[in-house]
Amino acid sequence: MLNESGYLYLNSANAWPSAVLSPTLQQSGGKLVLQQTGSVFATSGAFMAGPFQVSDRATQWFRVQATLQGAEGTHVQFFTFTTAAATAPWSPALLMPFTDPGWIAVPRDALDFVISNAPGLRFFLGGIFRGDGAGTAELEQVRLFYGRDTYAKFLPPVYRSQPKAADLLDRFLMVKQSVLSEIEQTIEDLPRLFDSAASPAGDPPSWLRWLSGWLTYTIDEHWTVPTARTNLAGAFELYGHRGTLEGLRRYLQIYAGVNAIIEEPSRETKIWSLGDAGLLGFSTSLAPGPLQGAVLNITATVDQSYMTTGETFGSALFEDVAHRFCVSVYCGELTTPGALDNVRAVIDREKPAHTTYDLCVIEPKMRVGMQARVGIDSIVAAGPAPAGTGLQLGTGTLAAQPVPCDDIQTTTETRD
């Protein structure tokens, strides 16, 4: 006889390949249910599943666990059968299909029970559905255990030295094991609760949202479950970029759905001096204040000057660009109501507190000196348009078709 233990599932990928159904029983959504005609259900139906074989030797078929949703007034009864033959006798057309010798009836509505049949090469499981016509029981899954995998394996071998005593001990321990098995399964599944790829994500409160709370990571209500899992998995790594240009860019992509262009003017600002080549307005600019601060009779002006120290000497040259950055977004990405407000909210939440930013919306235009950086803010509209005259510079297009950014404020906005 086979001494190994294990289990089989009868429902595989929402299908019952081993089950033969009576005419009044059917598969629906991966479940076995009574057949429905209009609003009325059949009052009786049966199935037989098998044969199940795990070895070329006789097997101790041990236990059956069924998952079932039962409506009021419905019942299910199971029957077990072991044999060396390839088929089992049953009569699906009869009200009681499992009357042949060898079938053992299980108490009605029992969903977790020990198989009482003698060891056999093959196992068959039968079932009868009963109802009052107003509803049906729904059989979702059946788990078939073979081998005696009980708590007796943790006891000294002397407790299993006598076959009859060992059989009684197995059945006695099985009573406790059936109660504790759900707790054991919960403990076994505990690691997946802390895995963003496997944590259950049902209606709130869900384990996935609870897990995000550990990192104080906000899951947007508009995200799909796969998107929420992916973003949560990268949350810890994302926090390492918080307060940086890359971090802000990724936050805008995740929470606002825009691929923003973020620039710091201070990175491009240079000190210009005589003798160095420079282009006025591009690589040179007027300083917002004198290098040395207030100098009596030279640069000191009432209410418009300030004193400098050794540590702040020269800081006035960069006062207008220090701690400042610009965020540019394409109007074509602001397609949902409130999208621009969402962009502002993300920036306000994630920017360093001491910084100031300008938010610019890039329209499909190209303006020399203002919006002419190819690949960044210079956009050539698609589709030809008739040429025209009398257009005000910066307000119209020539030989192109403009695409307006409807309902979007496209002016540059500065916020602290």
Image (spheres, helix red, strand yellow):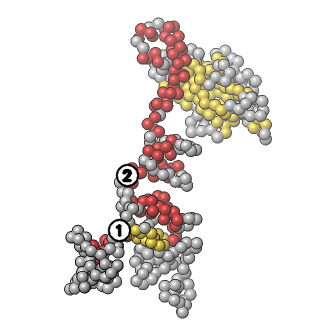
Residue bearing the label numbered 2:
237
The residue that appears at 39% across and 54% down in the rendered structure is 238
Quarter residue 87 falls in = top right
**On residue 276, which mark appears?**
none
Q: Is residue 35 visible?
A: yes
The residue that appears at 54% across and 80% down in the rendered structure is 402
Q: Point out residue 380 in the picture as x, y percentages from the top left corner.
A: 48, 79
402 versus 73 height, above or below = below
Q: Nearer the viewer, residue 35 or 369?
A: 369
Q: Is residue 58 visible?
A: no
Quarter placement of the C terminus: bottom left
Residue bearing the label numbered 1:
323
- Give the left or right position of residue 289, taking residue 376 as reference: left
Single out the residue that lies furthest toward the bottom. 390
Q: Helix, strand, or loop for circle 1? A: loop
- Give the left or right position of residue 131, taking residue 141 as reference: right
Q: Point out residue 218 in the picture as x, y percentages from the top left corner.
A: 48, 52
389 versus 217 height, above or below = below
Q: Point out residue 79 in the picture as x, y percentages from the top left corner.
A: 65, 21
286 versus 119 height, above or below = below
Amino acid at circle 2: Glu
Q: Nearer the viewer, residue 353 or 191?
A: 353
99 versus 318 height, above or below = above
Amino acid at circle 1: His
Q: Nearer the viewer, residue 148 or 119?
A: 148
Q: Point out residue 142 in the picture as x, y percentages from the top left corner.
A: 59, 29
Q: Nearer the viewer, residue 131 or 232?
A: 232
Q: Helix, strand, or loop for circle 2? A: helix
CA distance for labels 1 and 2:
25 Å
Q: How many marks?
A: 2
Mark whose residue sits in front, 1 or 2: 1
The residue that appears at 43% across and 79% down in the rendered structure is 371
